[in-house]
Amino acid sequence: MRPGQPHSQDAAGDDAWALAVTKFGEGALLNSRPVVRREFDRVVITTSAAGSMVLGAAMIAIPAGVAAMIWLIGRRVPGGAALLIFSLPVAGLICLVGLHILLCRNRITGRAGEPELRLRYGTVLFPKQLVLARQGLSAELWVGEGSDWPADKGMVYLTLRKEGSPASRLRLASAPRREELSAAYDALTELLGGRARDGTVVEIELPRGRRIRTSRTPLGTGAANFRTMKLTRPRPDQAVLKPTLGSRLFFAAFFLFGLGALAFVPWVTNQAFEDGLAAWLAVAVTGIIGPAFTILSLLGLSGRFGQRPVRFDLRQGLLWSAGGGGRSVRIDDVAAVQVCGQHVMGAGDAASFTAFELNLILSDPPGERLGLFSHGAEPALRSDARLLAEFLDKPIVDHT
């Protein structure tokens, strides 16, 4: 078999497309951020070698080290031989997985002017390659809407689309930001002769026939599952977005906990000496927890986590963010009020939820977006979006 020739189990043409869609129907060919590189005159779209090397080396070294420790120590303890016999195949299996991650990375390759693309996947011992005819294929970027699987809401997907096929999409990669997929998308567009569609970008019509292009993906500024901001009208010509009482109480609780931990340092030190514990360890743990929670609460109360007040003043024709790092924008440069949605994975035992994001789309610079806030209370956010749009006399665009 000549180098570069398809493996005996490979497929080509329509059979290859059907096999690829079946194989990667529920997942993606590339399971992390894609990178693009050149191998002579070929374009290769694959995943980062650095991440694969670190993970693969760790999965080889750790089980091998554990097995070696069991072999050294196990002979001196009861049941050590049985533990060694059990651990060796487990360690060997993990090492094989690490070797696969280290040496094998799925990839898609092609050459300008060639009539096909090649998909490579499989294991160390059984590599496979599918040859896809480029005819009828196009690159596509689109945003998940969460209709089939809630976790894809707001995620950006890079796919190959085949016209006229019942299973029309082959998922290649996904990421929370379009920028992480843009290089791979551009490379595919080049390989497919310009056949591509970017569903993450939309056109908005402005007065006097002007049009601007902007993104419909979330900015991802972070979100809580409760209402963190609200719109108030202190004067007829002013509107202010400010943190809710619940948001302030949330960070105030962190502040009280941090102060409480600092107050307990003397008591913990005394108890540590009386009980014969390592006093320095007790003081270090308490001393770290206290300042950490206090700093976290102060950052939250100052608006560093997206709760910075924003003031809109029609008389001055400006809006600006309060606090350090604030920004002033002319209200005339606001083209529309945008609502986006994204799925937020819960940490630990916390439940996942859908967060809704409120942004301003600017006409100068054209299409740039200014993130206001994001949280999981949909009715409240939509109400604030409607009131803000009426106050600014701007349209609402809903990209949820």
Image: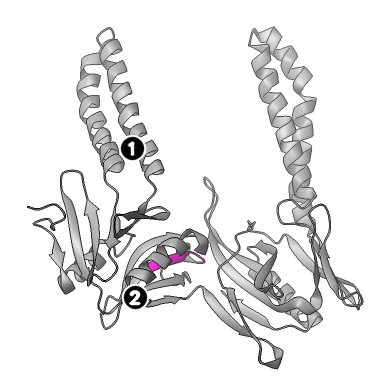
What residue sits 70% from the left and 84% below the top? 395
Residue stretch rendered in magenta on the structure:
154-159
Q: Residues within 10 Å of mark 2 (few under 14, many from 20)?
A: few
Q: Horizontally, is 156 left or right of 41 in the view?
A: right
Magenta span: chief secondary structure: strand
Helix, strand or loop for disc 2: loop
Is residue 355 visible from the viewing direction of this image?
yes
Q: Is residue 33 above or below residue 15?
A: above
Q: Secondary structure at mark 1?
A: helix
Residue drawn at (73%, 15%) of the image: 269
Task: Using the image, determine if residue 221 lies above or below residue 169.
Answer: above
- Residue 366 is situated, as x and y percent measured from the top left of the image, at 66, 75
Residue 273, how many percent across, how many down?
70, 8
Front residue of 115 and 27: 115
Which residue in the protein does label 1 denote? 56
Picture coordinates of residue 25, whole percent (x, y): 29, 65
Q: Is residue 249 left or right of residue 226?
A: right
Residue 193 disc label: 2
In the image shown, does 237 or 282 lie closer to the viewer? 237
Task: Using the rendered view, name the quadrant where residue 163 is placed.
Answer: bottom left
Q: Amino acid at mark 2?
A: Gly
Q: Is residue 225 above or below residue 400?
A: above
